[in-house]
Amino acid sequence: MAKPFFRLQKFLRRTQFLLFFLTAAYLMTGSLLLLQRARVALPHPQGPRAASPLQTLPVAAVALGVGLLDSRALRDARVSPELLLGVDVLRNPLARARPGPRWLRSRNSELRQLRRRWFHHFMTDPPGPPAMVLEAPPRPATRSRGTYVGCFSDNGQERTLKGAVFYDLRKMTVSHCQDACAERSYVYAGLEAGAECYCGNRLPAMSVRPEECNLECKGEKGSVCGAVGRLSVYRVDELQLGSRKREWRTATYRGCFRLPENVTHAFADSLAQANVTVETCSGFCSQKEFPLAVLRGWKCYCAYPTPQFSLRDAMDSSLCDQDPEVQRLEDYCEVYQTPVQDTRCTDRRFLPNKSKVFVALSSFPGAGNTWARHLIEHATGFYTGSYYFDGTLYNKGFKGEKDHWRSRRTICVKTHESGRREIEMFDSAILLIRNPYRSLVAEFNRKCAGHLGYAADRNWKSKEWPDFVNSYSSWWSSHVLDWLKYGKRLLVVHYEELRRSLVPTLRQMVAFLNVSVSEERLLCVENNKEGSFRRRGRRPHDPEPFTPEMKDLINGYIRTVDKALRDHNWTGLPREYVPR
């Protein structure tokens, strides 16, 4: 009799514990749902020992991170709570050590951080509401210093302002656009769709009704920033007083070149006057919206890079270093880059129809993926997508960042993923490989100082740097090996080769993407090759960051990857990958 009674007592105790656990889980889930529906953002601790970003996210954001919800669903009040109840609340990854090698744990943690970076950004610094349509007629921004000209129609194929283009999809203001255009010696600054800035030197004769420019600037309440297909245009003459002093320095010397056979056909405009200077020629061509100023004796020509004048075969500078009167009789000319941007390749859009081939642009972090995306977008005219969401890239014009990575509306999709399941989702891939020494330094700079900064001395001298090398160097190797093993159709591109021989390598990449591109467009890309995400300024002077032990480790991975490439009938790694 005692034995059955003991079993019954044990069963009741277990049932009591189970009911207590289920009740606690139910209350926690309900609290998270209430926080989400109230749009309350949990605080995110700062510092190197901060908890995982996922701890600060409500359940809906976690659902976004694992791909269960589209990002736009968070803004939809009709999202069913039942859909969110099935999502597990992820635990703090620091609470318990996970099995497996340390480099694998570090790599997976980094990938999760890349996937969910935007969701924490969304909750801690939520974007502003959609651009507000202003009912009152537009007026010049009160804080702008330029003169308001009017509202103009703007066509995506034939731009009204054909100079430089800038984006800031969260903080665009009239003054920011005016200053950016004035620094490049443009006369007009135009704002469109609340977040886009266009510069130019000439306007069409006819404007449209003022009330058609009725969208508020993303970063400045009460100021008008055009509308869809409409430009709010300001004249920025008074802002150019300071910029003209810098005009000589912004005219960059490109080299000495042989004149093309047909000068009249190759050069679209010209200026002939006594004592013509580089500053005069650059200013003249800037006003005409040409990116190149060509000097030959006392004559100035304005041009675009063309197949007949591609600027690839530079001559000895001494051939152009002569008296202008003598130079006039020679077949050589000096070429300068004006402050004007070559806009023949800046128009971009989403694919008109969904792509039948799902293409990845795969690389190890720090291998130049963002730069390659810039080149591909300008060469093809189509946006690239991303497996992750980087708000910084989106705000600067990579509009494919916000598109779902499986939408197939982009020409290719950025990814740092490896592993069979992640690779086999794609029909083909461009595999971008960079020297691991350079990649590790670039990614460490990004982790410590963002896209455009450099890590401080204390970062390099701390334990963080050797731990990073030990974790990430093996990831560099495994990333390439996995794509070689599981990739269905690959094009292997070396970052260094893309730098050395941009147009031929880019031509191969565009052909792989099955897009037809004119030679003029490729030359335009070459003229705008740097993009907006190159680290600028002086690189901090640091001693060699790699110890002999680090070099032995990395060199072993280099040899492994080199052998794997050759085994798969690809050219091996460039010799400069191993330090001499």
Image: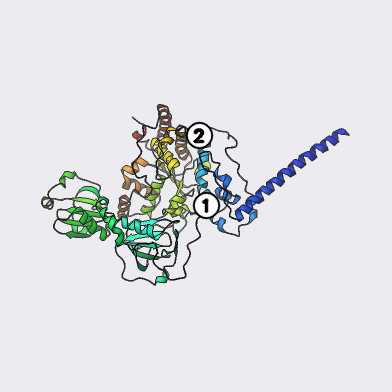
Q: Nearer the viewer, residue 323 or 500?
A: 323
Residue 221 in picture, x, y percent from top left: 46, 62
Task: Say whether disc 1 or disc 2 marks the residue closer to the N-terminus.
Answer: 2
Closest to the camera, between mark 1 and mark 2, is 1
Q: Nearer the viewer, residue 66 or 532?
A: 532
The residue indicated by pointer 2 is 103
50 w.r.t. 353: above or below: above
Q: Residue at x 47, y 47 (%)?
A: 427
Q: Amino acid at mark 2?
A: Trp
Residue under label 1: 122
List x then y, in percent, for residue 163: 32, 59
Mark 2 Cα within 10 Å, few/some/many (few <14, many 20+)?
A: some
- 72 up-or-down from 415: above or below: below
Q: Quadrant of residue 198?
A: bottom left
> Is residue 495 shown to the viewer in this render?
yes
| Residue 342 in view here | no
